[in-house]
Image (spheres, rainbow, N blue to C red):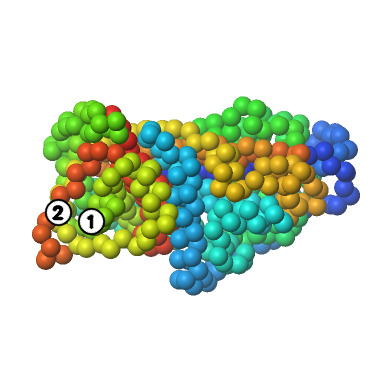
């Protein structure tokens, strides 16, 4: 049986201090064996102190288990969906594409408490935040806990792969750099991310490899070299990372013997031969003026929603959904589903997309204000990267996504339905309990 893993979204944000005056503020204490940082220039913002790479800064605060209202959860989830659709509209072309709204929004939320002024306002606007800061972080904490909640065990006769969602957050800071404890407390209490110390000044590439190794382990080795060569320099001061690993089989699997080669119509009107899978199940189905849709549950707390546009491309449909009522009016139907198996990967230029959406100040040294991270100024976002991978077959789904944001200094009733995805379609994968959009993508050519 083929192991199906659905790995999603890894976000790394590296924050770098620009040339700034030396400080006498003491760093938060660390534990563990020590080594000595190399001497660094007085204007670097870092100090010569002893530490061991990987030491965790002790802020004496455990991750909390906050009580949040259903309304607040719904508000953050709706904002993530809006953000995901708007981002998708900016980056989608005619090719296969997938992004992770959950992962990017979580990473930006980890950056947000360190932002001030216009920088904070623009991040809040891009994320469509409608709750106060404390509620935002509490909801992020709740969603992570809900994602990690194990489902009931499968029966002893059930040979499907166990359903697993495993989110993880981490923060990697320059040893000796004066991070504000208020900022570290937000990361520790709400994201479970104690600050791990690295020596960016003395060994930037070695530090990059340590973070990439964490990424590989968090994603079961599906994401390698998230931070490319040269992305970490002696000016780096902080890297924030979010990862989510997802493995799931379909609740009702497609029958391999029924998979046959068939035509799939491309956006230009031509066709390609692709493997078309077939199954029939009782599930949620919708037929609107914009799209035909089916909800395909996994054997756990998640489902893939596939939307077949009535006109235009999947990207056109995503654009229409930005302003449309996204509450799909499902009805229970017996549905015969035809869906192509597919596999693709790609890169998403995240920096210009975020700038297009209005997050501009953070990318400009003269306007960026991240003084909520450290009293030392001149932190700014220099670039952002996003990579994705997805494979889907008769048994289930496997996918991976990674993002790096580098910050430098300066039922019976209705008749049966048929759903045949033999032309480009939009899809998303959602966490059923919270409604959080984990992935959003389009398939324009499954061959």
Spot occupied by residue 169 in the image (x, y as percentages of width and height): 56, 50
The answer to whether 398 is drawn above or below residue 128 in the figure is: above
Most foreground residue, 203 or 73: 73
Spot occupied by residue 423 in the image (x, y as percentages of width and height): 25, 38
| Quadrant of the drawing holding the C terminus | top left
**Residue occupying the point 38% across, 53% down:** 321
Of labels 2 and 1, earlier in sequence is 1
Left or right of residue 396: residue 371: right
Residues tagged 2 and 1 counted as in contact (Cβ below 8 A): yes
Most foreground residue, 143 or 88: 88
Left or right of residue 447: residue 66: right
| Quadrant of the drawing holding the N terminus | top left
Left or right of residue 392: residue 42: right
Most foreground residue, 133 or 322: 322
Q: Across the whole image, how many numbered discs are drawn on residues?
A: 2
**Residue occupying the point 75% across, 32% down:** 234
Q: Which mark is residue 125?
A: none
Q: Is residue 430 visible?
A: yes
Q: Which mark is residue 287?
A: 1
Spot occupied by residue 170 in the image (x, y as percentages of width and height): 60, 48
The answer to whether 10 is drawn above or below residue 186 in the figure is: above
Left or right of residue 115: residue 87: left
**Residue occupying the point 47% across, 71% down:** 71
Callout 2: 10 Å neighbours few (<14), some, many (20+)?
some
**Residue occupying the point 59% across, 29% down:** 228
**On the image, numbered disc 2 is attached to which residue?**
417
CA gap, disc 2 and disc 1:
10 Å
* Rendered image quadrant of residue 365: top right
Which of discs 2 and 1 lies nearer the camera? The answer is: 1
């Amino acid at each position: 049986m083929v192991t199906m893993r659905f790995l999603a979204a890894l976000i790394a944000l590296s924050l770098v201090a620009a040339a700034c005056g030396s400080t006498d503020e003491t760093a938060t204490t660390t534990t563990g064996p020590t080594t000595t940082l190399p001497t660094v220039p007085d204007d670097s913002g870092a100090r010569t102190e002893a530490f061991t790479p990987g030491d965790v800064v002790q802020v004496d605060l455990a991750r909390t288990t906050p009580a949040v209202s259903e309304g607040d959860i719904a508000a953050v989830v709706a904002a993530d969906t809006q953000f995901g659709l708007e981002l998708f509209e900016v980056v989608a072309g005619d090719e296969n594409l997938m992004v992770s709204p959950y992962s990017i929004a979580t990473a930006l939320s980890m950056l947000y408490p360190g932002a001030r002024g216009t920088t904070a306002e623009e991040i809040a606007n891009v994320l469509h935040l409608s709750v106060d800061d404390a509620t935002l972080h509490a909801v992020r904490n709740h969603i992570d806990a809900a994602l990690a909640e194990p489902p009931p065990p499968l029966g002893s006769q059930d040979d499907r792969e166990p359903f697993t969602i495993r989110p993880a957050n981490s923060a990697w800071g320059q040893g000796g750099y004066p991070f504000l404890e208020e900022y570290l407390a937000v990361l520790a209490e709400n994201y479970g991310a104690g600050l791990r110390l690295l020596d960016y000044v003395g060994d930037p590439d070695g530090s990059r490899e340590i973070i990439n190794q964490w990424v590989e382990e968090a994603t079961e080795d599906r994401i390698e070299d998230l931070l490319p060569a040269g992305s970490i320099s002696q000016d780096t001061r902080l890297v924030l990372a979010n990862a989510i690993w997802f493995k799931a089989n379909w609740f009702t699997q497609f029958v391999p013997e029924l998979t046959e080669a068939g035509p799939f119509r491309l956006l230009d009107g031509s066709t390609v031969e692709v493997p078309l899978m077939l199954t029939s199940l009782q599930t949620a189905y919708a037929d609107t003026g914009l799209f035909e849709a089916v909800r395909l549950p996994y054997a756990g707390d998640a489902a893939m929603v596939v939307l077949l546009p009535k006109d235009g491309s999947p990207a056109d449909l995503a654009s229409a959904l930005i302003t449309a009522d996204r509450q799909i009016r499902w009805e229970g139907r017996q549905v015969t589903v035809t869906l192509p198996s597919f596999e693709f990967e790609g890169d998403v230029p995240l920096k210009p997309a975020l700038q297009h959406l209005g997050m501009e100040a953070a990318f400009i040294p003269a306007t960026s204000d991240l003084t909520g991270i450290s009293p030392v100024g001149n932190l700014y976002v220099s670039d952002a990267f996003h990579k994705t991978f997805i494979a889907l077959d008769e048994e289930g789904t496997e996918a991976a996504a990674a993002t790096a944001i580098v910050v430098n200094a300066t039922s019976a009733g209705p008749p049966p339905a048929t759903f045949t995805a033999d032309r480009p379609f939009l899809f998303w994968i959602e966490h059923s309990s919270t409604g959080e959009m984990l992935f959003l993508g389009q398939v324009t050519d499954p061959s």
